[in-house]
Image: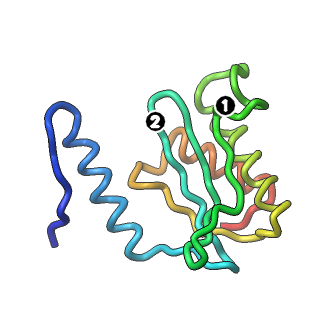
Amino acid sequence: MAYGVKIAKGNAYKRAAAKRRHIRIRKRISGTSERPRLVVTRSNRGITAQVIDDIQGHTLASASTLDASIRGGEGDKSAQAQKVGALVAERAKAAGVEAVVFDRGGKQYAGRIAALADAAREAGLKF
């Protein structure tokens, strides 16, 4: 089945492919109040993680490389992704979330995405 994703010039083919993958994933994955969705958004410079209850439409916890505790920190991008994973898990636990559904956002589960997920698991968040 084809998905309606507009394609422009330049690097848009990769973005359109990622958008199609994310649409396929989101057909199966949805966050509830018992198990919200942990969404990971990765760019070339940073990474963001949000814990979202899709039924109510609320973000319960979030963390990013732009947070004051992580910004300008030591290490490469994978180390920063680990810090974001630990921070979002800590904030989610403080909000009363024990288990989440992982949404990789159409990106490949490797590198920074896997580092964030592993750090969140080590911090006590169940997938």
Where residue 31 appears, x then y in whole percent? 57, 74
The residue that disc 2 covers is 43
Where residue 73 appears, x then y in whole percent? 72, 22
Question: With respect to residue 6, does 95 lie above or below?
Answer: below
Question: Under tag 1, what secondary structure?
Answer: helix
Rendered-image quadrant of the N terminus: bottom left
- Identify which residue is drawn at 77% across, 70% down: 98
Question: Under tag 2, what secondary structure?
Answer: loop
Identity, as a three-letter code, of the amino acid under mark 1: Ala
Rendered-image quadrant of the C terminus: bottom right
Lower sequence index among marks 1 and 2:
2
Q: Residues within 10 Å of mark 2 (few under 14, many from 20)?
A: few
- Identify which residue is drawn at 57% across, 79% down: 55
Using residue 87 as the reference point, say whether residue 117 is left or right of it: left
Q: Residues within 10 Å of mark 1 (few under 14, many from 20)?
A: some
Identity, as a three-letter code, of the amino acid under mark 2: Ser
Using residue 72 as the reference point, say whether residue 106 is left or right of it: left
Q: Quadrant of residue 24?
A: bottom left
Using residue 7 as the reference point, say whether residue 120 is left or right of it: right
The residue that disc 1 covers is 79
Query: Looking at this rendering, what residue extends furthest in the front direction?
Result: 57
Where residue 58 appears, x then y in whole percent? 63, 67
CA separation in Å, label 1 and label 2:
15 Å
Q: Quadrant of residue 96?
A: bottom right
- Identify which residue is drawn at 37% across, 60% down: 22
- Disc assigned to residue 59: none
Question: With respect to residue 37, does 85 lie above or below?
Answer: above
Where residue 60 appears, x then y in whole percent? 70, 62
Residues at discs 1 and 2 in contact (Cβ within 8 Å): no
Front residue of 42 and 66: 66
